[in-house]
Image (spheres, helix red, strand yellow):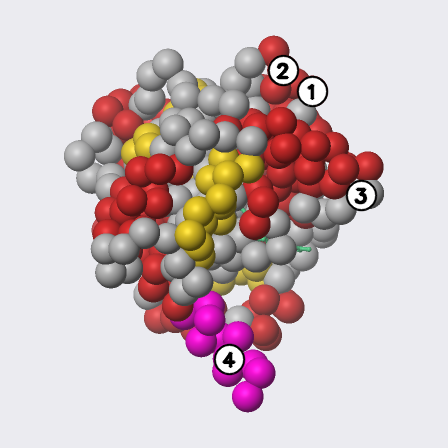
Amino acid sequence: MAQCKSVLVFGATGLVGTHIMRHLLAKKARFDRIAVFTSRNTVETKSEVVAQLKAEGVEVICGELTNADDVKHAYEGIDTVVSAVGRNMIERQIELIRLADEATSVSWFFPSEYGTDIEFSSKSAHEVPHQKKLKVRAAIRGCQNLDYSFLVTGPYGDGDPGLYFSSNTGAEEAGSFDATAREAVLLGDGNVPISFTTMNDVGKFLVLALLHPAASRNKVLKVNSFTTTDHEILAEFEAQTGGTSWRTRYTSIDKLKDLEAAAWTASNPLATLFTLRRIWAEGGTLYRQRDNHNIDAEHVVDTLADAVAAAILVQAQGEKEVKRKLT
Ligand SMILES: NC(=O)c1ccc[n+]([C@@H]2O[C@H](COP(=O)([O-])OP(=O)(O)OC[C@H]3O[C@@H](n4cnc5c(N)ncnc54)[C@H](OP(=O)(O)O)[C@@H]3O)[C@@H](O)[C@H]2O)c1
């Protein structure tokens, strides 16, 4: 089984890409080359991040994702491509995959997944937010010379804006844990099990997948950090924020479905978030088995307590950012 020695990352400075890079760099001795492909705009607007990557020995290749020559040039000598592009660029990967299939050196491609299992059940094929990722899976499965890995992580157990362990400002009814206001909105009866992966663990799993090609190539890898319920998450937040009870409300699954339908009708950009939360609350993250053990990740994952501690810090930092901007 071919090993991954030269890896190129798309989306390296993005939300999850940053975590992937941190874990790749922690294992850089295992690779001959680590390169990132990024736009001129990112090189200018995130110059400190780019300088840090270069200081760590990362090759920074500047180009446009929409320019085939730039991408072909970046693929030279690369055996594995990891994409962590954001939702707005998902479909663009079909061309990146076609070019990777043509490139002589590239043999393995991780498209930007890192979320809900888009082939969980027969219903999954009809979920609006899955459509572009389903097209990407079809494109890569049709390739002649390219292996794939789809890293399925479920929702992120993190406190960054809009993620499950955040206050979810603007869409609180779809679930919220606000560590400052000490308020929560729980889904269903609060006892629905959901399987989460912290973004820290997404980076860890991705690198372990690269290092275990026999277990990862041409596989849908279903991984997670922990499975828990809203009540258990709330109890952990309460324990870590002074031990007293938070003000708590509930959104029934029917109410969530109404919010989802109204958001799609109004072309509200939050519609995707409502749909994903409804899928998670209906059990769409509860896989029959997980693949952590296949890539030696069984004992290295974050716990619920780790995730909540990190989320409290991230939420507090977010508040500071807002105050800084206001003063
Ligand atoms: N499971 C969950 O709860 C969850 C939550 C959020 C996202 N996700 C998934 O995680 C994956 C990555 O999402 P993300 O939120 O981390 O992405 P992101 O931060 O929005 O974007 C990642 C990167 O995509 C590249 N990019 C975006 N727009 C571009 C453009 N117009 N031209 C060129 N490059 C562009 C940029 O790369 P550079 O760094 O090179 O500039 C950017 O840093 C997606 O598949 C998403 O669905 C999952």
For marks 4 and 3 on the same chain, the one whose residue lies earlier in the sequence: 3
Could you tell me residue 306's position as x and y percent?
A: 25, 49
**Mark 4 C-beta closer than 8 Å to ligand 1:** no
Query: At numbered mark 3, what does the secondary structure look like: helix, strand or loop?
Result: loop
Could you tell me residue 225's position as x and y percent?
A: 31, 36
The amino acid pointed to by label 2 is Lys
For this rendering, which residue is in front, 278 or 156? 278
Q: Is residue 155 above or below residue 191?
A: below
For marks 3 and 2 on the same chain, the one whose residue lies earlier in the sequence: 2
Query: Dominant secondary structure of the magenta stretch?
Result: helix
Q: Quadrant of the C terminus?
A: bottom right
Q: Is residue 287 above or below residue 24?
A: above
C-alpha gap between disc 4 and disc 2: 43 Å
Which residue corresponds to the image point at 34% horizontal and 42% vertical from the top-left?
A: 233
* Dots 4, 3 in contact, CB < 8 A: no
Residue of label 2: 123
> Which region shows up in magenta?
317-327
